[in-house]
Image: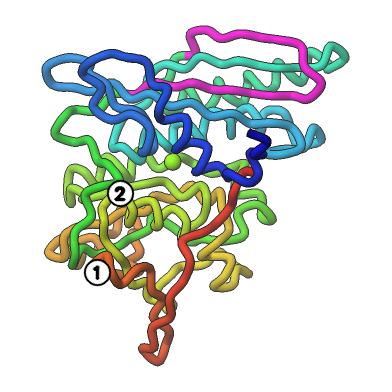
Amino acid sequence: MLTKLSQIGEFGLIDLLKEYRGSRAGVIKGIGDDTAVVPLDAKRYLLLTTDMLMEGVHFKRTAPARVIGRKALACSISDIAAMGGLPRYAVVSLGVPGNLPWAFVRDVYKGMDALARQFGVAIVGGDTIKSEKIVINVALTGEVSKKDVVYRRGAREGDQIFVTGPLGKSLSTGRHLKFTPRVTEARYLIRHAKPTSMIDISDGLAADLGHILEESKVGAVLEENEIPRRAGAGLRQALYDGEDFELLFTVPRRKAAFLGRQKQFRFYPIGEIVPRAKGLLLKNKTGALAKIEPRGYTHF
Ligand SMILES: [Mg+2]
């Protein structure tokens, strides 16, 4: 009765809320992936996602407003990319203190607008309320053809695990504010290698790979030497820091060599899918295996 959210945790909370899902037939994928997937037409699905950023948690008021606005939309675009889709329409809600300068809000929108133009997104509405802290919520739709959609649940034993870029220290280097969502890379992957599972790295490599393993009911071995790290990042930071917004995906082994040779984009092979009973393992330089926890950034 007096259980606090901090005791349940973010993912425990999501689990509890799954019960309250209304009623409508035809939902393809509800809670439990990067976006929801619902019917659109004969050939396509509609993707739905929403992301909330709050002052003091995700950004400081002293950060440039344009950069904050850009990030608010970029996080949602990244989730659409992780499903293999293209972003389409956004509605944006703002909570702002009455004494906030107009220029701040304008610049938040300038930042969103620039990224929206780059990715062909229309901002079509929203809501504003007065609040003590600045809160920005972006809800975004996307489209994906039925044959292209990629879930977290399709990884199979023997599949090779890849990431689209170096990991770690995203927060301390400011990358988390400036990243480009990997929409183009995802489209390329679907055309040329059809990933069996995909997710964007928001909570950290270990945690987000954990989501793929759980949904796919498999285990994984990560090669310590192969995990690409951002300059100055150690192994722990590459494994557990959040907000990299790179794509993490699996492909059948026969596609792996082809991806490793790509010049247009760089795809980094970092490990292999193994039977579920093995869990999540890290192989070091000497070949020794150690179990690691699929944890990362938690929100409560
Ligand atoms: Mg995601």
**Is residue 230 found left or right of 294 in the rendered image?**
right
Secondary structure under badge 1? Answer: strand
Identify the image quadrant of residue 62: top right
Identify the image quadrant of residue 80: top left
Classify 250 as above or below 31.
Answer: below
Q: At 37% across and 25% down in the image, what residue appears?
A: 87
**Is residue 179 found left or right of 5 in the rendered image?**
left
Instruction: Tell me residue 293's x, y (percent).
Output: 48, 66
Q: Between 128 and 229, which is closer to the camera in this rendering?
A: 128
Instruction: Tell me residue 213's x, y (percent).
Output: 32, 57
Instruction: Tell me residue 269's x, y (percent).
Output: 32, 67
Q: Residues within 10 Å of mark 2 (few under 14, many from 20)?
A: some
Specify whether tag 2 is near ligand 1 (CB below 8 Å): no
**Is residue 291 found left or right of 112 in the rendered image?**
left
Instruction: Tell me residue 280's x, y (percent).
Output: 38, 68
Indicate which disc residue 118 carries: none
Indicate which disc residue 215 carries: 2
* Residue on which the image places disc 1: 274
Whole-Å distance between the Cαs marked 1 and 2? Answer: 14 Å
**Amino acid type assigned to the residue bearing label 2 in the image:** Glu
Q: Residues within 10 Å of mark 1 (few under 14, many from 20)?
A: many
Q: Earlier in the sequence, mark 1 or mark 2?
A: 2
Q: Tell me which segment is drawn in magenta.
A: 123-142
Residue 258 lies in the magenta stretch: no
Q: At 43% across and 27% down in the image, what residue appears?
A: 49
